[in-house]
Image (spheres, grey):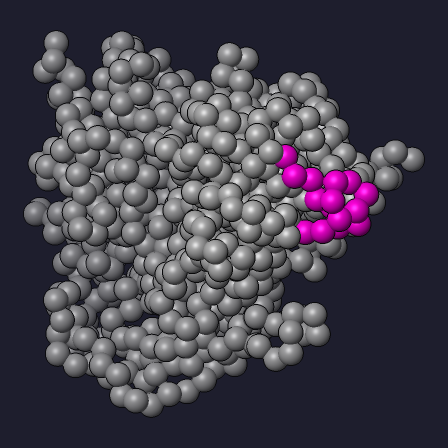
């Protein structure tokens, strides 16, 4: 097969930024079959691929891309699904530039001048692995009718707490091995952060629900409205309900605040609250009973994916100005590159190297005379400069003493989350580190309590969907080994 | 789906329902709350557990019709079902070891105060219930309070029921008469709890209040229910809902509770109009 020597990726078709900034439909439209084949042909099919070790679940990337190049899309899907249980999700939300695509050999292949045939000093773009993964899984979902596979049950029961990426992955892997798996979810729908956190325009909820349905089809039971730690404890599950092992994937939900003046004013949200109202409760739709404010001008504090999501949701609610306030520079933004680019295209204004010091409240008159009494009326930010690297290895932002005020009527705090202490507080024998993260054996993901495993953000603190999936996979393997060894 | 087993009108705007929720029923303790959704587009609202019957597997809730969701809820009948009913959430009230307690209930807050008064009574605590309503027509749970209180003081704003005046006046009279409460538990409108706390601070009587801020998930995830207690941010859903009343910043709590008021009013009217149309 002829290799496509074009140095650049096939661009992703997207909705026009001016249009999409006002709707919640998916931003990226996905490759066509022609684009996918063309992109797949850019892969050099390395003998020792460097992309695979870059993938937290080690998908056999060259093999699936090879099938795409041949037009065998379903075969490509089968290769991906050997390693990943949520490919349609990962193709959309993985930070590929830091993982598979970041490791692609093409990044080191110089771009030649077409006339002089000398190096231009630039390097090629990696193969669009994420875009191909998404294409393949979307193709599978829309073209393939899966015959229900009958899996022989092995009679062992496992409980999974939390139905986010780690829980769903762990549940899927165990169900495929014949375990009777019950997933307990605190909210009213399954999916965790995929439902409440990541917005519709980045990850359509129908896709998440189709992945959940896939698990139900192989026999996974999903119990929503069950807050483990309150309604049943882990000990209850293991002593009264016959579960032989538990997996905890309860995430890192507890939002952090900055403890600056004015943080308790009206119209100050945590990103979790803002996004939950929009994504889970559909507050942007007229038929939803959940309220949300439609701000005129918004400051989002933070620079991660969640901050980008909050910025872009605020635009879609009709805000005229959305400012992203981040204390480090553009290079340090922790968000996926594509999210930052999309946010910029849609009109999010970045105030980089700035740190909020105070949220200004409208305290004129009293609540009776002033309908905006107690509401946000601005945010005071301080210019920062980067100093010496800190413990995280990143250069530490230092205050400069120069302040400006942004005219905003809403502030969204997106500065991270901590693990929910509920499970720790209600499960004797489970230990956490000083950050509240569950302590696990790194080889097996077993916690300090026998037969109880954990993974995802509950262990690592806020991280990515794919890392959580990797942990769910590892734990499923350990749980299987543990139960089989008991016999 | 969670079936409504029974429904009882307590006054024109306050209703009691028993919901079939066996798991919740087994675990719920006084002071904890649940979150429900009436239907698929419904919002999640928190309501305090008003009682349980673990044998029948039911949980009672008492609610006042104040907005669209409670209006919808009030239109449901025994035999209908709720889309979601999750709990028990929050920390149970700490009642152990209390010998002499004043339970203050204001308006619909009495629904939350009653299970505490009952639990205290059951463990042998001397219970003085001081209960206030705007007028006689709004009185609820009179018999229930009578049964579990050693002393039952009735107050109303207009004097149509019990003594005319505020609950704080009755409480101060008790304290001045020499009653030594080891704790006051105040549950009702935020403004009432604020004034009870101002009073008890003066007399140095420990006071616990049950906060009822706006919530979404109720498990500590959204941070919507944050309250300033002793200068620190606390989440009512996981750190509360009970807090030391002398430490709570009631003014900011009152402001935050009003965040969506114009929207709520609009949605309520819309919902009422919808029900009126259905009747026609």
Residue A436, image x and y in percent?
23, 47
Q: Is residue A388 above or below residue B104?
A: below
Task: Name the outermost residue toward the front.
Answer: B177
Q: Which residues are magenta?
A: B152-166
Which of these two is toward me, A209 or B167? B167
Q: What residue sits 27% from the left and 77% below the top? A: A329
Indicate yes or no whether the magenta region holds residue B157.
Answer: yes
Which of these two is toward me, A313 or B242? B242
Q: What residue sits 38% from the left and 71% below the top? A: A260
Q: What residue sits 56% from the left and 47% below the top? A: B177
Q: Is residue B18 above or below residue A39?
A: above
Q: Is residue B171 above or below residue B151?
A: below
Which quadrant would the C terminus of chain A be assigned to in this image?
top left
Left or right: residue A122 compared with residue B146: left
Task: Name the outermost residue toward the right.
Answer: B280
Residue A278, image x and y in percent?
53, 52
Indicate yes or no whether the magenta region holds residue B84.
Answer: no
Left or right: residue A54 compared with residue A216: left
Q: Quadrant of residue A332?
A: bottom left
Residue A32, image x and y in percent?
43, 50
Q: Quadrant of residue A363?
A: bottom right
Q: Is residue B130 above or below residue A255?
A: above
> Does residue B33 appear anywhere in the picture?
yes
């Amino acid at each position: 097969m002829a290799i496509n020597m074009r140095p650049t990726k096939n661009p992703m078709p997207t909705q026009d930024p001016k249009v999409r900034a006002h709707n919640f439909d998916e931003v990226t439209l996905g490759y066509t079959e022609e684009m996918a084949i063309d992109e797949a042909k850019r892969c050099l099919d390395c003998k020792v691929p460097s992309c695979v070790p870059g993938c937290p679940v080690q998908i056999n990337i060259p093999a699936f891309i090879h099938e795409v190049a041949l037009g065998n899309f379903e075969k490509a899907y089968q290769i991906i699904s050997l390693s990943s249980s949520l490919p349609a999700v990962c193709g959309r939300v993985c930070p590929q530039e830091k993982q598979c695509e970041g490791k692609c050999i093409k990044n080191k292949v110089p771009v030649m001048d077409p006339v002089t045939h000398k190096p231009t000093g630039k390097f090629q773009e990696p193969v669009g692995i994420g875009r191909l993964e998404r294409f393949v899984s979307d193709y599978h979902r829309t073209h393939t009718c899966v015959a229900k596979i009958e899996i022989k049950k092995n009679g062992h029961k496992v409980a999974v707490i939390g139905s986010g990426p780690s829980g769903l992955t762990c549940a899927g892997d165990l169900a495929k091995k014949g375990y009777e798996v019950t997933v307990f979810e605190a909210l009213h729908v399954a999916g965790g952060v995929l439902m409440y956190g990541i917005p519709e325009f980045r990850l359509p909820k129908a896709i998440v629900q189709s992945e959940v349905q896939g698990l139900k089809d192989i026999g996974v039971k999903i119990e929503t409205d069950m807050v483990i730690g309150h309604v049943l404890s882990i000990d209850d599950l293991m002593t009264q309900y016959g579960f032989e092992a538990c997996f905890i994937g309860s995430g890192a939900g507890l939002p952090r605040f900055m403890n600056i003046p004015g943080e308790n004013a009206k119209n100050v949200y945590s990103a979790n609250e803002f996004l939950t109202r929009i994504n889970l409760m559909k507050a942007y739709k007229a038929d939803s009973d959940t309220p949300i404010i439609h701000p005129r001008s918004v400051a989002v504090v933070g620079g991660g994916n969640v901050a980008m999501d909050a910025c872009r949701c605020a635009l879609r609610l009709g805000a005229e100005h959305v400012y992203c306030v981040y204390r480090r520079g553009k290079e340090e933004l922790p968000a996926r590159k594509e999210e930052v680019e999309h946010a910029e295209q849609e009109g999010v204004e970045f105030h980089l190297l700035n740190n909020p010091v105070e949220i200004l409240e409208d305290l004129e008159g009293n609540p009776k005379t002033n309908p905006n009494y107690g509401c946000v009326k601005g945010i005071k930010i301080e210019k920062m400069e980067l100093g010496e690297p800190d413990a995280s290895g990143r250069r530490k932002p230092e205050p400069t003493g120069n302040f400006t005020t942004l005219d905003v009527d809403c502030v969204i705090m997106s500065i991270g989350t901590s693990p929910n202490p509920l499970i720790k507080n209600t499960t004797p024998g489970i230990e956490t580190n000083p950050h509240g993260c569950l302590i696990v054996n790194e080889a097996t993901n077993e916690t300090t309590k026998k037969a109880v495993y954990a993974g995802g953000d509950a262990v690592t603190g806020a991280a990515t969907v794919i890392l959580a999936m990797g942990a769910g996979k590892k734990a499923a393997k350990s749980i299987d080994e543990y139960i089989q060894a008991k016999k | 789906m969670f079936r409504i087993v029974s429904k009882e009108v307590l006054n024109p705007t306050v209703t009691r329902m028993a919901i079939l929720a066996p798991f919740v029923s087994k675990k719920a303790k006084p002071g904890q709350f649940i979150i429900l959704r009436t239907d698929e587009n419904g919002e999640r609202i928190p309501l305090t557990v008003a009682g349980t019957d673990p044998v029948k597997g039911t949980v009672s809730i008492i609610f006042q019709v104040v907005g669209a969701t409670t209006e919808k809820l009030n239109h449901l009948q025994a035999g209908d079902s709720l889309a979601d009913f999750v709990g028990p959430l929050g920390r149970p009230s700490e009642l152990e070891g209390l010998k002499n307690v004043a339970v203050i209930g204001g308006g619909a807050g009495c629904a939350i105060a009653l299970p505490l008064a009952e639990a205290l009574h059951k463990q042998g605590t001397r219970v003085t219930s001081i209960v206030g309503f705007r007028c006689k027509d709004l009185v609820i749970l009179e018999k229930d309070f009578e049964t579990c209180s050693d002393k039952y003081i009735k107050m109303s704003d207009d004097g149509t029921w019990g003594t005319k005046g505020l609950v704080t006046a009755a409480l101060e009279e008790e304290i001045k008469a020499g009653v030594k409460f080891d704790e006051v538990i105040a549950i009702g409108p935020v403004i009432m709890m604020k004034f009870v706390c101002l009073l008890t601070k003066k007399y140095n009587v420990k006071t616990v209040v049950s906060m009822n801020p706006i919530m979404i998930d109720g498990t500590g995830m959204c941070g919507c229910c944050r309250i300033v207690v002793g200068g620190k941010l606390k989440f009512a859903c996981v750190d509360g809902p009970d807090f030391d009343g002398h430490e709570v910043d009631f003014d900011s709590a009152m402001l935050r509770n009003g965040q969506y008021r114009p929207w709520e009013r609009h949605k309520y009217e819309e919902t009422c109009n919808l029900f009126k149309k259905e009747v026609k």
